[in-house]
Image (cartoon, coloured by chain):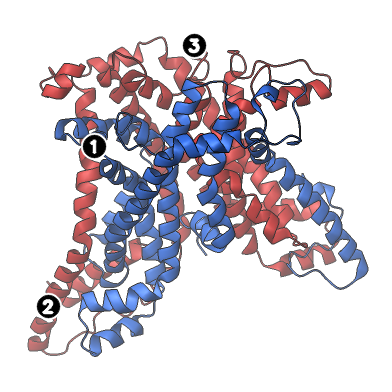
């Protein structure tokens, strides 16, 4: 569709625009089209922000206000009053999930990439399959286990459950990355008398910084966004994550959409930060597992 | 065991590890050197055993983790599906064995086929449209223009937002009375649609929201696939007088086929298990109009005051089976490409 609308015979997919004036004009048209498409795509996000600032009495206005002409911060006030504990719990669960995911996946990936354990191939296969298991099935299994062992409604139980989303992904990212570390580097460490653990800790891990960031980002984001596990395993807990906070809001006060959307805006902050601060890691994470160079 | 054989055994994980994430092990040939005399061979064997031990020491936490937090829950789920559980027997853990009764109950439930049909429609329509939109956008962004990098990054937003955020936003946008979508339709002269409350539209509504969430994923993967197509091909084609559409049909699309296959299959596996979105927007309703296997399974187990864990687990296991069929197909395609 796009290919047809742009009448460019010389469409060399080079990122740098050519100095000639005709291509420059074409580039400007493309920028305009790109801005419009992006605006369309992000309209729901804009709408979320707009509704979060709309006063309660205007909520059901017809036609709706397309811009927050009379912005109110009632919604955000409600977030501060009601949702702060939920946000802190989510932060705690997110960080815990990152720690657990890194602790389990990085050493294993080091072995898979560099030490070549027998049966490593089978393990890789198991991890691939693990990623395909629906969360709802895992949730039901965990529900049974947690109930029997009295782990229900605990924040650290939720950390365990949330980490299952991230661990297979983490192992695969780390393995791919660590495979690219030159063998000379680890060999040199061994010659210098470092054991495998030292080599892993002070040579391999520092070099794998990019993979560390990618895995941390995604495990945090997934734990932060998790709803299935939270709703099945922690819906009666004293510490509940923000996803449940929003869900409660929707269920309880069906009418206060500015408060609901304000919470949604606040719950989106980690994603927004990620995009601003760590964009290339995000793209790397999405692409990993799908494309082979 | 001869050294050569040990060699091959040690190397085989590395080769089959040709992982999804790219980059093969760098030094395939850097296996252990072949020792000349028998003494050295024995020493080598000892050393290898030691290094195997170390390697498994590093892997052990992962294996224990997978056993405790993947295998055990799945086993528990299977166990649930084969017993007649109630809340009481759930706590006491003494539910009577019921064989395939839960499965047969589920298969004969009047909801089964609608849920199956909805799952298929939801999955296929979603991935097809996500893929088409993602590909069009990838081709567009691949042309490179000012701001293209920034705009492409902004396109990731829907994918990064927590599902509850996007789902509730869409739910409000699609609200029958005060939703902005109906207002937009009103502006172009179309009457209001009961998006979430009419059985005819509920499934469409959740599909629309799901497509919106899935486009970024397709865009990013297909874009990086496009970047691997050498620019000279397009130059040569345009010298030969091929237009944009020709270039897309003869160069882009065929060369992108491996990446497309992976994207579609991965999308299939991911979309099959979508639960949050549908549950938050419609709870599978009205009636079963937007119930999929995932939401149906959840409704059995947690959706009512009288949980039916057995049938819920049975539906979940059926869902796993379907996901695995496509998943294994995905792994096959990927292995073939890696080879």
Q: Nearer the viewer, residue A102 or A14?
A: A102
* Location of the N terminus of chain B (image quadrant): bottom left
Image quadrant of residue B32?
bottom left
Residue of label 1: B73
Which numbered mark, 1 or 2, is in the foreground of this view? 1
> SS class of the residue under badge 2?
helix
Q: Which residue is drawn at 70% across and 24% down?
A: A58
**How far apart are the alpha carbons under marks 3 and 2?**
66 Å
Q: Nearer the viewer, residue A163 or A125?
A: A163
Q: Residue at x 59, y 14 (%)?
A: B197
Is residue B88 placed above or below A205 in the rendered structure?
Answer: above
Q: Which chain carries label 2?
A: B
**How far apart are the alpha carbons under marks 1 and 2?**
39 Å
Instruction: Answer left or right for B236 relative to A118.
Output: right
- Callouts 1 and 3 close, C-beta under 8 Å: no
Chain letter for the part of the structure drawn in red:
B
Q: Which of A243 and A128 is in front in this view?
A: A243
> SS class of the residue under badge 1?
helix
Image quadrant of residue A22?
bottom right
Regarding residue A292, the answer to whether it shows in the image is yes
For marks 1 and 2 on the same chain, the one whose residue lies earlier in the sequence: 2
Residue of label 3: B287
Residue of label 2: B45
Q: Are marks 1 and 2 on the same chain?
A: yes
Q: Position of residue A153 (x, y in %)?
A: 27, 34
Q: Mark 3 lies on which chain?
A: B
Q: Position of residue B53 (x, y in %)?
A: 14, 69
> SS class of the residue under badge 3?
loop
Is residue B301 placed above or below A191 in the rendered structure?
Answer: above
* Location of the C terminus of chain B (image quadrant): bottom left
Q: Chain A hue? A: blue
């Amino acid at each position: 569709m796009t290919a047809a609308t742009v009448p460019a015979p010389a469409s060399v997919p080079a990122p740098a625009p050519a100095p000639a004036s005709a291509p420059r004009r074409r580039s400007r048209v493309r920028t305009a089209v790109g801005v419009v498409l992006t605006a369309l795509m992000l309209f729901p996000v804009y709408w979320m922000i707009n509704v979060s600032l709309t006063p309660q009495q205007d909520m059901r206005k017809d036609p709706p206000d397309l811009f927050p002409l009379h912005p109110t911060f009632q919604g955000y006030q409600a977030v501060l009053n009601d949702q702060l504990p939920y946000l802190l719990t989510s932060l705690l669960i997110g960080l815990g999930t990152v720690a657990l995911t890194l602790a389990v996946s990085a050493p294993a990936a080091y072995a898979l990439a560099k030490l070549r354990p027998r049966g490593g191939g089978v393990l890789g296969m198991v991890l691939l399959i693990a990623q395909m298991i629906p969360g709802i099935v895992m949730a039901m299994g965990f529900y049974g286990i947690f109930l029997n062992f009295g782990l229900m409604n605990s924040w650290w139980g939720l950390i365990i459950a949330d980490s299952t989303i991230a661990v297979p992904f983490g192992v695969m990212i780390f393995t791919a990355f660590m495979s690219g570390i030159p063998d000379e580097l680890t060999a040199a460490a061994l010659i210098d008398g470092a054991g495998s653990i030292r080599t892993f800790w002070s040579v391999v891990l520092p070099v794998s910084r990019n993979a560390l960031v990618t895995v941390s980002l995604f495990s945090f984001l997934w734990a932060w966004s998790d709803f299935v596990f939270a709703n099945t395993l922690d819906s009666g807990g004293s510490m509940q994550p923000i996803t449940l906070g929003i869900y409660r809001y929707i269920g309880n006060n069906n009418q206060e959409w500015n408060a609901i959307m304000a919470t949604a805006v606040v719950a989106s902050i980690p994603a927004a930060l990620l995009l601003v601060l760590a964009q290339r890691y995000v793209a790397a994470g999405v692409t990993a597992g799908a494309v082979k160079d | 065991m001869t050294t050569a054989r040990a060699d091959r055994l040690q190397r085989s994980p590395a080769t089959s590890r040709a992982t999804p994430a790219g980059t093969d092990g760098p030094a395939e040939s850097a296996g252990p050197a072949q020792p000349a005399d028998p003494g050295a061979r024995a020493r080598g064997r000892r050393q290898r055993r030691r290094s195997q031990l170390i390697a498994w020491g590093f892997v052990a936490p992962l294996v224990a983790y997978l056993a405790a937090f993947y295998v055990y829950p799945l086993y528990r789920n299977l166990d649930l599906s084969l017993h007649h559980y109630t809340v009481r027997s759930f706590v006491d853990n003494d539910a009577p064995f019921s064989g395939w009764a839960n499965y047969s109950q589920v298969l004969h439930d009047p909801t089964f086929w609608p849920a199956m049909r909805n799952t298929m429609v939801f999955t296929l329509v979603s991935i097809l449209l996500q893929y088409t939109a993602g590909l069009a956008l990838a081709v567009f962004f691949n042309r490179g223009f000012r701001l293209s990098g920034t705009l492409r990054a902004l396109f990731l937003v829907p994918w990064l937002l927590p599902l509850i955020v996007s789902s509730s936003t869409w739910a409000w946008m699609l609200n029958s009375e005060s939703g902005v979508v109906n207002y937009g339709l009103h502006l172009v002269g179309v009457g209001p649609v009961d998006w979430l409350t009419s059985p005819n539209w509920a499934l469409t509504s959740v599909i629309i929201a799901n497509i919106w969430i899935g486009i970024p994923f397709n865009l990013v993967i297909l874009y990086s696939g496009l970047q691997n197509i050498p620019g000279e091909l397009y130059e040569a084609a345009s010298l030969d007088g091929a237009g944009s559409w020709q270039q897309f049909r003869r160069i882009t699309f065929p060369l992108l086929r491996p990446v497309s296959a992976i994207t579609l299959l991965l999308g299939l596996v991911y979309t099959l298990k979508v639960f949050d979105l549908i549950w938050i927007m419609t709870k599978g309703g009205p009636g079963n109009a937007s119930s999929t296997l995932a939401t149906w399974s959840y409704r059995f187990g947690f959706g009512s005051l009288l949980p039916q864990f057995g049938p819920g687990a049975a539906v979940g296991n059926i869902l796993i089976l379907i996901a695995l069929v496509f998943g294994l197909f995905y792994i096959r395609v990927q292995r073939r490409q890696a080879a």
